[in-house]
Image (tube, rainbow, N blue to C red):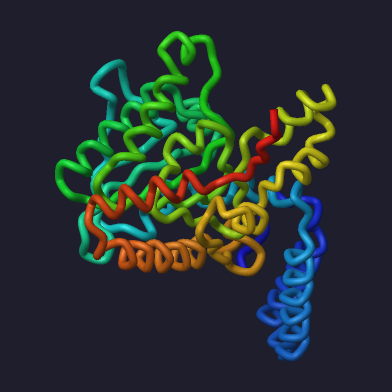
Amino acid sequence: MATIRNLLDFEKPLHELEEQVQELKRFTAAQGIDRSQEIAALESQLRAVTKRIYSQLAPWDKVQLARHPARPYTLDFIRMIFDDFLELHGDRTYGDDPAIVGGLAVLNGEPVMVIGHQKGRDIKERSLRNFGSARPEGYRKAVRLLKLAQKTGRPVVSFVDTPAADCSVGAEERGISEAIARSMMEMSGIRVPVVVAITGEGGSGGAIATAVGDRILMLEHAIYSVIPPEGCAAILWRDPSKAPQAAAALKLTAKDVHRLGIVDRVIPEPLGGAHRDASGAAQLLKQAIVESMDELRGLSPNELLERRYKKFRNMGRYLEMAG
């Protein structure tokens, strides 16, 4: 189990046990005294405590996990899942937006098109990629790649991990709402299979813009909601500090979203979350993507479009009142 970085409050008991395990291993190496039984007992206790903690997480805890700075991002998953990735840049209209990455890749020998949001690891990269909040040119780049995928007959894999779309004055001036709507429209009508994976934050229109697919997968500790909890709390109670209450009300966890029929499948993460075992999480996600592609491969373009249409039309519940 990887050493915990950027500890969350509920992870502190795990850190203490890990420190004890490491200390015993250092002592064994230095003194040459066999402490294997004690180490095994502590490791067993660590696994049990980890399992207990992660089975009782509150929605706000899930939000913190989805935002964990050590969580794998789109480029990490691309590196671990695909071969021969060739990144393509620019929207051919305004410029390139590093908050959305995409390009040609190979999945188990099959050519595919990959797109996804990309956050940054350090201050410089976070600024460059705008914390994963895409601008209009990012979504227009995604649309360009979607059209290229259809032209070349490549299935699409879309990774979603964004707090929301960019809401700056510049983004509004360049038509962020239209860019999101166009991306949704193009994904709705693309005549190749589309598999979506929500890997971290699925926030607001910035997420749904690239999440219209035939199969929607969601990692166990990811979140998916119409608005970030802080924004919801600010609107409902005029108090962003009530974000934990908003998180519970939004039903944004993978379990809730799957129960509501918004996503098709929840992908379990390695014990302790994807930030502890990125490679393990990537392999589980890859298996689910491959299985989804296999399910869709035999469908004609018309069948894909018809099923995709019905899928999204059937989402949600409403009540009609007599006039």
Residue 96 position, x and y percent, is 33, 24
Q: Quadrant of the C terminus?
A: top right
Viewer-proximal residue among 310 and 66 = 310
257 vs 30: above or below: above
30 over 126 or under it: above or below: below
Q: Is residue 84 visible?
A: no
Q: Residue at point 64% right, 33% down?
A: 227
Observer able to see residue 137: yes
Residue 242 appears at what percent x and percent y? Answer: 84, 34
Specify whether 191 is left or right of 307: left
Residue drawn at the location 26% of the way across and 66% of the way down: 108
Image point (62%, 40%), residue name:
225
Furthest toward the left, the residue is 152
Picture quadrant where residue 122 is located: top right
Residue 228 image position (x, y, % from top left):
66, 34
Q: Quadrant of the N terminus?
A: bottom right
Of residue 190 and residue 145, the one placed in the foreground of this image is 190
Q: Quadrant of residue 292?
A: bottom left
Q: Indicate left or right for 92 with 79 as reference.
A: left
* Residue at image point 43% right, 47% down: 159
Total labels: the figure holds 0
